[in-house]
Amino acid sequence: MKLLITGICGFVGSRLAACLLERAPGLEVTGIDNLIRPGSEGNRSELRSKGIGFTHGDVRFRSDVESLPSCDWVIDAAANPSVLAGVDGRSSPRQLTEHNLAGTLNLLEYCRERKAGLILLSSSRVYSVKELAGLPMREQAHAFALDDSRLPQGVSSAGITERFPTNPPVSLYGATKLASEIMAIEYGITFGFPVWIDRCGVLAGAGQFGTAEQGIFSYWLHAHAARMPLRYIGFGGCGHQVRDAFHPQDLAALIAMQLQRTPPDDPIYNVGGGAENAMSLAQLTAWCDERFGPHQPQPDPRPRPFDIPWLIMDYSGTRSDFGWKPERALDSILDEIAEHVRSHPGWLQRSGAV
């Protein structure tokens, strides 16, 4: 089987490539990356050492995509992953749309012409910001927790299911991912190629680079250890907002199964760490204090666009259909990142976060 991964020099793309090679003997992996993210160039030589093909190109350019070799499956891992993209002054709304939607459309044309299947890595941020912000909350052990007595459809203490509303606002970033999902499914139905949609929660692990919006767990550990300024933004400035996390190894385990199956009529699946792998920023700070010594974030109660108090991915549908659950516990992921922090001082500077 031949596999093409876009964004292959990014954190997720490079880890998926290595993990899938280990899981599927005989798999041929190649990828494309524009190398515009600081730090991505460092993954290039490691991929080549594993026999993984590489094309320096940009999925936004049709000619770059058309020149790629044929394959059986495409994993679309190329995107601007920040929920603040298009409004943070680092990129324009047009740039965001070109990266996250136009690039996917070029890949869909590639899949149509080459009869290749597509696995689209989507996001938990396709879910409605307004609905998430309106969930009933209480404070418990320095973290927000759901008030289970009055919950709407599509959410429980286990997290958000695929039935949770996706109505606007979802952020410009979330809108590009949701539009990509719709177009991918329509292309697959219309032109007869398989499509899977994996709505991913927060992916975390050693070697992740970028800003807090791209990987809050890794960023927080590196910044805490380096005694860089940290802030609890919004929600009273207490750091009680909660997210779950999971490791690319566990995502690779799911994808390895999807590569061998025919998608159902509804191919959308939540993938994340779940309630057992969830933590608030305040709890993450306490973990860091024990590992690296005390370092107190500053409260900043001013609200920020598209921020939400609580988002945990309920992966029960994925578990039911695939027998999948995350094998890596959050503590082991944090330990892995902490070891990377120890052995890579100055990582945030080299990866463009500061």
Image (cartoon, rainbow, N blue to C red):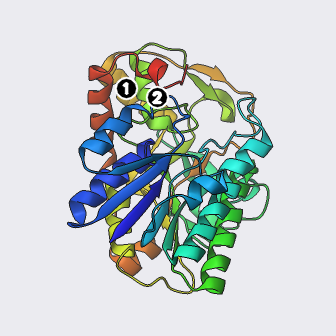
Circles 2 and 1: CB atoms closer than 8 Å: yes
State which mark lies toward you, 2 or 1.
2
Where does the C terminus fall, quadrant-wise? top right
Number of numbered callouts drawn: 2
Seen in the picture, residue 19 relative to 344 is either above or below; the reply is: below
Residue shown at 44% from the left, 70% from the top:
73
Nearest to the observer: residue 267 or residue 275: 267
Q: Secondary structure at mark 2?
A: helix
Nearest to the observer: residue 37 or residue 295: 37
Residue shown at 33% from the left, 68% from the top:
256
Horizontal arrangement in the rendering, residue 185 relative to residue 252 (left or right): right
Residue found at the very far top of the displayed protein = 227
Mark 2 and mark 1 lie on one chain; the one further toward the N terminus is: 2
Seen in the picture, residue 85 relative to 252 is either above or below; the reply is: above
Nearest to the observer: residue 308 or residue 203: 203
Residue 120 % position (x, y): 54, 64
Q: What's the amino acid at mark 2?
A: Trp
Seen in the picture, residue 155 relative to 231 is either above or below; the reply is: below
What numbered label is drawn on residue 335? none
Horizontal arrangement in the rendering, residue 185 relative to residue 325 (left or right): right
Residue 284 % position (x, y): 43, 33
Q: What's the amino acid at mark 1?
A: Cys
Q: Secondary structure at mark 1?
A: helix
In the picture of the structure, the residue carrying the numbered disc 2 is: 220
Label 1: few (<14), some (14–19) or many (≥20) C-alpha neighbours in 10 Å: many
Is residue 120 visible to the viewer in this orientation of the structure?
A: yes
Residue shown at 40% from the left, 22% from the top:
347
Residue 66 % position (x, y): 58, 61
Where does the N terminus fall, quadrant-wise? bottom left
In the picture of the structure, the residue carrying the numbered disc 1 is: 288
Label 2: few (<14), some (14–19) or many (≥20) C-alpha neighbours in 10 Å: some
Query: Can you tell which quarter of the image residue 101 is in?
Result: bottom right
